[in-house]
Every structure is written in C-alpha cells, then in structure tokens.
Image (spheres, rainbow, N blue to C red):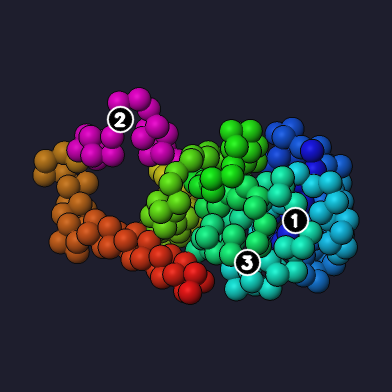
Amino acid sequence: MKISFIGAGSMAEAIISGIIEKGVAAPQQVMATNRSDEEKLARLQSNYDIQVTYDNKALFDGTDIVVLAVKPKDAEEVLQKIKHYLQPQTLFISVLAGISITYLESILKVQCPIVRAMPNTSATIGKGATALAFNERVTATDQKLALSLFHAVGIAEVVAEEQLDAITGLSGSGPAYIYYIVEAMEQSAAEIGLEKEMAKNFILQTLSGATEMLQKPGNTAQNLRQAVTSPGGTTEAGINILQQHQVKEAFISCIKEAMLKSKKLGAAFDR
C-alpha cells in the first residue's frame, strides 16, 4: 500500500505520525509533497523516514490512497494540477473544511472513491475526533482503510455528509471553545491572587478529571453538575452567575453559528 499526502502541514503530519506509530503503514509506504516549503518536507522525511517529492508522477505512481491536506483557498488550483494523475481505483481523502464531495467530483472529473473527513486539531496529539462521509463509489474495504487512518489519531465515526457542518461547529471548532474557557479561568485566577503556574496546573487537572468522570458509564454532564452543586454552596453561587449571563445559551449559539459559517463556506465553493 502507498499513501500520498498533498500538503505537509500540522494535520498531514499528525496523520503521518499516527499511521506510522500505530503500524497502519510503514514509513516507506508514505510519500508527501507541498507547494514549495522544502525545509518542512525535509523535516518530515527526517522525523518519519518517509519519502518526499515535487514530482507529481512519482507522487501518484502506484498510490492507493491520496490525502488532500492543503488550505481550502488553494483547493481548486491543487485539484486542477493533480486530476490528470488520479486513477479511478485511488481512494481520495480530503480533510478540507467546507469543501463538499460534489465540488471535489466536479473538479477532479475522475470516477473514484472520495472521502470527506472533518478532523480537529487534537489529532496532532493522537486525541482527535474525526467524522467521515463517503461518496457512492467508496467500498466497504475503502471505508475500513479510511477509518484506520483516522483511528490512528483518535476516534473516527461515519456520518452523512450533511452532518459534517454540524460536526465542524461542535468538535472541529470545539477545542477553541475549551481554550476560551481556560483563558477565562486563568484570568480569574490572576484576579483573585493565584500564582500563574500553580493555577494552570489546577485548571488542567480539573479539566482532565472532569473528562474522565464524564467517560464513566452512566455519568451525564447534568447529573455530575448537580452532584457538585450543593444547595446554598459555593458551586451554586458560581453557576447562578453563569445562568444570569446566559452562558449555556451563548455556547449553544456559538456552535450553531460555527455550523452556519461552515455551510456558507461550502456553498460559496459549490457556486
């Protein structure tokens, strides 16, 4: 099996690192290219012992899977350059936000299996959450291959393509929402007189512990919150402030707005 990566940024590197570490592919089975950053390609080659090239013929020769991991704004230019090299049996995987399968098919003009993937940045540490959608040419074997790539960097689930915008708003952008909360907690810690590094340690341990509690069978966010929130206690006082500021409603609106933005970006490409 040969896997060719077009684009060599953080997401491509995360997948390359994951599939090699988990044994999904050997280094000699992986090849990568980018627009012009030779230094980045050389680093990937040095770190993972993969092959790198600027020769499209070499990149596509005998390849089984192509992973498109460039910036969405560069999509059309790249697709136009590579479409003549793509074979009908090649599994084509795109990790570009907002780029629909219909758009990819319209540019490529090749009757090949296409996977649209929506990972998030936590894939760079093997904790990603990726949703995958397929066109009708993707076989059961293709699905298994695609899932194996993204299981190597976290969890992966198959969804209908129309659900990908919702996944983008929820988990694609989700890490930024958590970082936003941590920023607020860090600022509050400074304002109430806690030393910065100590406060950070407490915040991170609190998040880690809460995550593990949520993962225990039978636990729900609501039940866990209620268990901590004693009547007349300190937690209740804090929750009351969040409710006064409609923080829950704000987060719901935030996720919905991100979903709508994803839909608009996709519609603009399709036009």
Mark 1 crowd level (few <14, some 14–19, many ≥20, 10 Å Cα): many
Q: Is 142 displayed left or right of 259 in the figure? A: right
> Mark 2 or mark 1, which is nearer the start of the sequence?
1
Report helix, strand or loop for mark 2: loop
Quadrant (top left/top right/bottom left/bottom right) for the N terminus: top right
Determine the CA span between mark 1 and mark 3. Answer: 12 Å
Q: Position of residue 41 (x, y in %)?
A: 82, 60
- Of circles 1 and 2, the one toward us is 1
Q: Is residue 212 magenta?
A: yes
Question: Callout 3: helix, strand or loop?
Answer: helix
Per the rendered image, the range of residues in magenta is: 208-227
User: How many neighbours does mark 3 have within 10 angstroms: few (below 14), some (14-19), or many (20 or more)?
Assistant: some
Q: Which residue is mark 3?
A: 107
Q: Residue at x 28, y 34 (%)?
A: 220
Q: Is residue 218 magenta?
A: yes
The residue at the point 68 percent across, 46 percent down is 91
